[in-house]
Amino acid sequence: MSANALQRAVFERLTSETGVSALAGADRIFDGRPERIEPPYVTFGDWRIEDWSTGTEDGAEHRFEIEVWSEVRGRKQAAELADAVRKALHDAALTLPGFHLVNLRHLRTRTGRDTKSRHIRARLEFRAVLEPAAS
């Protein structure tokens, strides 16, 4: 499935990117929000897939969020970590077994305070278009 291949490639890119690991740590990137771990960390957020096929080619458009969680004290840490994530993924040439990544673009970042934890969260939305690899 293209979503699994893309998520794995994004995870590998984020864990290997020194800008992200310097701010959050390479072991602080999670599929979902972890319990009892204080920020900073990075998580995968919402993910949506839509058909992007043409008359002759199969394809899928993925819109997904990467969430950056920061300490309660302010937005600076969240902004720096969000920028590192954006730089790591925007226009990245990721390798996905079985698929060709047509493009990967950062669309927007929204930052705010989580009402439950009071931590700062930045939500980065990305758009990726994938096609099956030629056999």
Image (cartoon, rainbow, N blue to C red):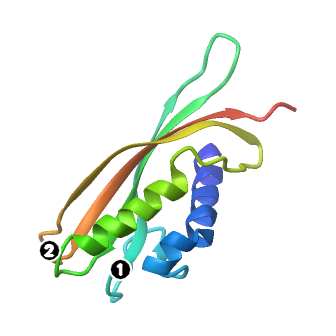
Label of residue 116 in the image: 2
**Height in image: 89 above or below 30?**
above
User: Where is residue 96 drawn, in percent x and y?
Assistant: 71, 49
Q: Residue type at mark 2?
A: Lys
Q: Residue type at mark 1?
A: Pro
**Occupied quadrant, residue 59:** top right
Circle 1 Cα neighbour tier, 10 Å, few/some/many (<14 / 14–19 / ≥20): many
In the image: residue 3, left or right of residue 75 = right
Q: Residue at x 58, y 36 (%)?
A: 103
Nearest the camera: 112 or 53?
112
User: Where is residue 114 drawn, in percent x and y?
Assistant: 17, 68
In the image: residue 66, left or right of residue 73 = right
Residues marked 2 and 1 touching at CB (< 8 Å): no
**Occupied quadrant, residue 69:** bottom left
Residue 79 visible here:
yes
**Height in image: 73 above or below 100?**
below
Question: According to the image, label 1 marks what residue?
Answer: 40
* Disc 2 element: loop
User: Where is residue 84 drawn, in percent x and y?
Assistant: 45, 64
User: Where is residue 102 drawn, in percent x and y?
Assistant: 63, 33
Q: Nearer the viewer, mark 2 or mark 1?
A: 1
Per the model, the C-alpha gap separating discs 2 and 1 is: 16 Å
